Amino acid sequence: MLGFFHRGECDTLIAFKLDRIARNMLEGGQVIQLLQEGKIRRIITTERTYLPADNVLMIAVEFGMANQYSRDLSVHVRNAIKTKVASGQYPGLAPIGYLNDLSREEGRRTIIADPERFEQVRTLWHLMLTGSYAVPALWRKASDEMRLTTPQYGKIGGRILSKNTLYNVFHSHFYRGWFELNGELHPGSHPPMVTEDQFWRVQELLGRDGLPRPQRKHDFAFTGGLIRCGECGCSITAERHTKTNKHDGRVHKWTYYRCTKKKPGVTCSQPFVEVRELERQVDGFLASITIPGDIVEWALDSLRTENVRDRAVQRETLEAMRRDLEQNETARRRLMDLRLRDLVDDEEFRQRRSELASDGERLGRDLANGDDSSNLWLNRVEGAFCFCKEARTTFADGDRAVKRQMLEFVGSNLILEDKKLTIYPGEFFAGVQKAVENQAWLPLLHDVRTTSLPEWLPVPPQVVTKAV
């Protein structure tokens, strides 16, 4: 700007106030020099007009006061940010899936789970954890099927989630309960969306330096290490063959699964298995965990009644946890105040801050998990029972990704030997198998209260809704 006056291109400077012209004493001195030399003939503000003949001492004082105000404001803002970070609060705009709680007074605002988008974003994390999706495929699912939009703050946001934003979501430590500021990681008090193990598992799936792994060339459902050979322990792969009928020109396609036979020094004798035979065996397993619809309704009615009683006890526990968390936040603010007044040294401050942050993170996590744990448990039970009711239909109608997710969901250590697929069910589904075999439902209802339930369901939302 000053170059215009040096070159004589203008001679009048207009500003709202004098302190808006110069950011520091160097710039202020240059403006005063130009005014004294007559290159600036007048400075017009809302308060008065300054001319070359005026006493520049008063102008210099005003510039000095403006500069000191700016310096004091900078220190105040930095201290406020330090206090917020020490209490586990991210001093910025919350990422998608979370919201800045504007209901609190300024300076004490927190970040909370977005009731509209939190579960949607968590679903994307869980789908990524299956290993069946690349980020572009998840982005299309989020934009086309889920219609996931960014939260709107004034004129910002309210648009469909972009692909770059989704990549940033999967790389952000925020979703595991931490946040990054100036290149450093700090524990946050916001509720985590995924666990530590889940977060780092996604980083492995994304590949080195955050680059997505190449997509599979073929769309086979049961490859990629999902099933192992019972004879040599190698992975099961798949092949697709086509043949054209010479008489009518029709093209026939077959898909076979077989052992990769890559173990050195071992000759594997296992034969090929046609995909329809493999899926028939999976359907047979799903039939063994299929619960009749009337039993599902009876079981869920009983569990919902019990859940109402449990929530009354839970409220007292949550209230005690909230009081402990408030005391932790108060202790963090007092510690930061002592540090700002140099009443504690750096080493003691860092040690005490780390202890309080660890306690606050634990309390925040327990409170977030327990705040709706009864409903969360009930939702998982409802989802698991409804999954068992609709499993065979979902598998028959599902695409490659759904079929793969269902196998990962119901069991582990899948073994293929002599054309026979062996599935070892998880704890819940083992209990369901026993109940279906013996037609004994009361023991299942009792065991489900202490059984480890899956956190998510690999079935489309419309299937669960229909089942309920």
Image (cartoon, helix red, strand yellow):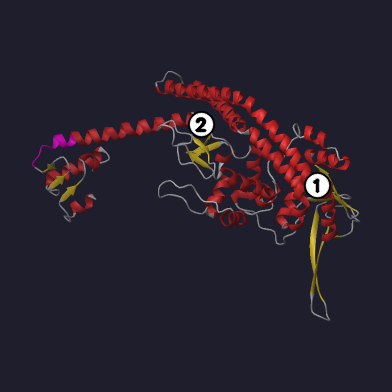
Q: CA distance from mark 2 to mark 1?
A: 46 Å
- Residue drawn at point x = 79 percent, y = 38 percent: 427
- Give the answer, above or below, for where 168 lies relative to 341: below
Q: Position of residue 425 (x, y in %)?
A: 81, 43
In the rendered image, which quarter is residue 396 located in?
Answer: bottom right
Q: Which mark is residue 14?
A: none
Side of 426 relative to 52 (left or right): right
Q: As drawn, which residue projects farthest toward the bottom? A: 247
- Give the answer, above or below, for where 270 lies relative to 48: below
Q: Which mark is residue 290?
A: 1
- Mostly what secondary structure, the magenta segment? helix
**What stretch of residues is rendered in magenta?**
53-60
- Amino acid type at mark 1: Thr
* 56 part of magenta stretch: yes
216 and 455: which is toward the camera? 455
Using the rendered image of the protein, determine whether residue 263 is visible from the camera's viewpoint.
no
- Amino acid type at mark 2: Gly
- Residue drawn at point x = 68 percent, y = 32 percent: 307
Judging by the rendered image, the residue that carries numbered circle 2 is 88
